[in-house]
Amino acid sequence: DAVITDPPYGTQELGGGYGRRQLHDPAGRIGKQIANDVDLSAIAQAFPMCVALIKSGWLMVFYAPRRTPAFVAATTEAEWFGSLVWDKTSMGLGYHIRYQHESIALFKVGNPPRPPHALKSILTSYRDDVRHPHAKPEAIMRTLVEWVAPQTKTILDPFMGSGTTGVACADLGRKFIGIEIDEAYFNIACERIENAYRQERLFA
């Protein structure tokens, strides 16, 4: 019914601005890299497949501000509806611009029902999960899930990382399908999501 995802940003080779090679490993302080982050080929291939799966609904895709022209060129199969900003509350590394935000593109497929309420264009929250170097805050993902899909609908995340979108779906009683290429993150995501659905059933 909807897609919410955070694909590789294609920023691995960029310097002096927002990048996906950050030092978030608390054990060894080793810069972690995201698979297929050299360019935007991953989202260029996945985006039309996501559009084809949705008969009438919404797509939300996180992307790097510095890659806006390339991102727009890679996502032409659906109608651009608008964009949101995630204010991370702390600056990243960089020589020219130290980015404190990431962008979220909103695409419309078909004629989906009107969302239950309006969204603020700036969503503010500090990241709250350290198991993935670029995990999104659960509060932000719950806001997006609630907006794009009415109760009981199914949300797909083809780049699910450590599974925060799935956790948000469990918290809100939505169904979830997730895909992740990195086995270590896939296992973390499965554990988190299974625990979240278990909690949701206990307190339903």
Image: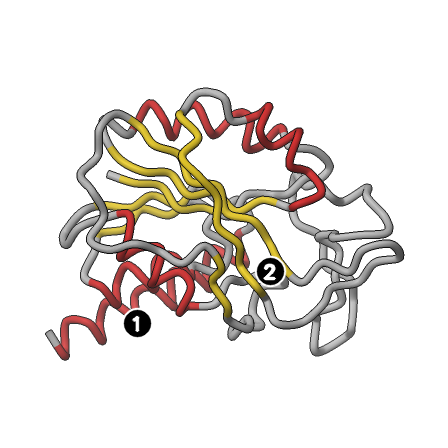
Tag of residue 134: 2
Q: Where is residue 112 shown, x and y percent of the image?
A: 21, 34
Q: Secondary structure at mark 2?
A: loop
Q: Where is residue 5 shown, x and y percent of the image?
A: 45, 46
Which residue shows up at 63% across the image and 63% down it?
133
The quadrant where residue 91 appears: bottom right
Q: Where is residue 169 shown, x and y percent of the image?
A: 28, 59
Which residue shows up at 22% across the image and 28% down it?
111
Write down the residue under mark 1. Answer: 195
Which residue shows up at 34% across the image and 64% down it?
167
Q: Residues within 10 Å of mark 1 (few under 14, many from 20)?
A: some
Judging depth in this view, the residue of 13 and 111 nearest the camera is 111
Quarter of the image that includes the C terminus? bottom left
Callout 2 amino acid: His
| Label whose residue precedes the other's in the sequence (1 or 2) | 2
Q: How is the image coloured?
A: secondary structure
Judging depth in this view, the residue of 48 and 85 nearest the camera is 85
**Viewer-nearest of labels 1 and 2?**
2
Question: Whole-Å distance between the Cαs marked 1 and 2?
Answer: 21 Å
Callout 1 amino acid: Asn
